[in-house]
């Protein structure tokens, strides 16, 4: 177990700290009396309400690629969590240039700024399991940290994430920047607001990750859209993912910061494969949704039919293990969604005019 007291009187930088994962991480960090937590977020896919009001928290609205913001960062940080991103595969497909500006360039410019900082103990980079996962609907094995990275990627988002890993390795080797790469699986939980942030040219601005979409629709007694069970053919298992609760992912990030080996990479995964059809059925049961499941065609860009991460290395080297089982995590997320329905609806509604023209 890691003691959260290790953040006591420490200075922490969290890029993307107003986002779903970043804000949950900040809320954990401030429990241990840090000296300072600086959040940099341009609110492109986040809401200001997620930033906790706390004496140690300083919020800077803007991109971490902004020169004026970068120049204002001094060599005072003990830990850096680089979580800022251009949210989502579909948004990146709709606008690859925006993805580059907010997902690739941000990492390069941040590393270039802090490469000579000497106080920093660890820089944790948020990568994605989809960059390494085999692109198939066939039988799979859990993806390990050592599996090869394919040149065939499904989206600019996935490309950007693996480029960020390349830069993390380069800056560690060239400048001794103590980077640790954390490969996320599919994160869910309280605090993910549908429609958060600005319009990004695609309905994925609103209908982003599968769990908050399914929960919202189920609570409104709407059909849950499942892409033909994700099947490439009738004899294949449906599309699947490895779902990990946000509290677990935050503990994993902290484990990377305290126990991760500089220059190395760790999967933050539950290690449990769940099909999207199973997920839809479970959420319908937990919400008593009477609507039938809606079968849609497979997304033509997504070839990662089945995906699950191997958590062995993280368990051994970080003593990290996902603790919240899917059913419990879904119950918590459903309760949070019920309590925040007006906020979620407000964020969805601000994009109504855009959605009408799509």
Image (tube, helix red, strand yellow):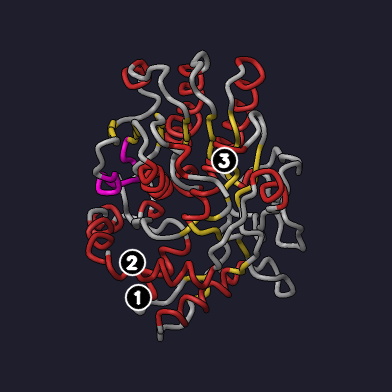
Q: How many marks?
A: 3
Where is 288 relative to 236, above or below? below
Q: Is residue 50 found inside the magenta-colored segment of the image?
A: yes
User: Is the Cβ of the residue at disc 2 closer than 8 Å to that at disc 1?
Assistant: yes
Using the rendered image of the protein, determine whether residue 40 is visible from the camera's viewpoint: no
Q: Is residue 273 left or right of residue 126?
A: right
For mark 3, does the 10 Å Cα neighbourhood hold few (<14), some (14 to 19), or many (20 or more) residues? many
SS majority, magenta: loop
Q: Which residues are magenta?
A: 42-52
The reply to whether residue 263 is in sight is yes
Horizontal placement of 191 versus 296: left or right? left
Among the 4 quarters of the image, the one containing residue 334: bottom left
Q: Earlier in the sequence, mark 2 or mark 3?
A: 3
What is the distance, in whole Å, between disc 3 and disc 1 at their CAs?
A: 31 Å
Q: Picture coordinates of residue 253 (x, y %)?
A: 53, 43
| Dot 1 alpha-carbon crowd within 10 angstroms: few under 14, some 14 to 19, many 20 or more | some
> Which residue in the protein does label 2 denote?
337
State the SS at label 1.
Answer: helix
User: Quick one: 117 or 282, which is closer to the camera?
Assistant: 117
Structural distance between the alpha carbons of marks 2 and 1 = 9 Å
Q: For mark 3, what is the residue? A: 127
Give the residue number, with chain letter if any, for mark 1: 219
Residue 173 image position (x, y, % from top left) = 67, 19
x and y percent of residue 285 in the render? 47, 82
| Mark 2 surroundings within 10 Å by alpha-carbon count, few (fewer than 14), some (14 through 19), many (20 or more) | many
């Amino acid at each position: 177990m890691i003691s959260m007291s290790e953040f006591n009187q420490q200075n922490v930088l969290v890029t993307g700290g107003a986002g779903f994962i970043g804000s949950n991480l900040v809320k954990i960090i401030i429990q241990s009396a840090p000296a300072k937590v600086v959040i940099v977020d341009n609110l492109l896919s986040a809401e200001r309400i997620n930033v906790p009001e706390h004496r140690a928290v300083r919020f800077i609205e803007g991109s971490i690629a902004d020169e004026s913001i970068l120049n204002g960062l001094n060599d005072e940080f003990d830990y850096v969590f680089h979580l800022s991103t251009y949210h989502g595969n579909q948004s990146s497909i709709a606008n690859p240039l925006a993805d580059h500006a907010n997902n690739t360039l941000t990492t390069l410019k941040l590393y270039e700024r802090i490469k000579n900082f000497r106080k920093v103990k660890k820089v944790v980079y948020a990568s994605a399991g989809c960059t390494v996962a085999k692109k198939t609907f066939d039988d799979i094995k859990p993806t390990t940290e050592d599996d090869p990275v394919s040149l065939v990627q499904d989206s600019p988002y996935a490309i950007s994430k693996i480029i960020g890993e390349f830069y993390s390795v380069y800056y560690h080797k060239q400048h001794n920047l103590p980077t640790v790469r954390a490969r996320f699986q599919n994160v869910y939980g309280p605090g993910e607001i549908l429609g958060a942030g600005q319009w990004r040219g695609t309905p994925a601005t609103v209908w982003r990750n599968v769990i908050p979409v399914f929960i919202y629709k189920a609570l409104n007694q709407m059909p849950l859209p499942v892409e033909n069970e994700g099947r490439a053919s009738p004899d294949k298992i449906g599309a699947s993912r490895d779902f990990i609760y946000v509290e677990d992912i935050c503990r994993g990030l902290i484990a990377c910061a305290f126990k991760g080996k500089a220059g190395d990479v760790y999967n933050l995964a539950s290690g449990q494969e769940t099909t999207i059809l199973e997920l839809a059925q479970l959420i319908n049961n937990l919400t008593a949704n009477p609507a039938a499941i809606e079968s849609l065609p497979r997304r033509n860009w997504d070839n990662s039919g089945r995906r699950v991460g191997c958590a062995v290395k993280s368990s051994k080297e970080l003593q990290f293990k996902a603790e919240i089982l899917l059913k419990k995590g879904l119950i918590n997320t459903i309760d949070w969604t019920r309590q925040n329905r007006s906020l979620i609806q407000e964020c969805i509604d601000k994009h109504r005019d855009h959605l009408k023209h799509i």
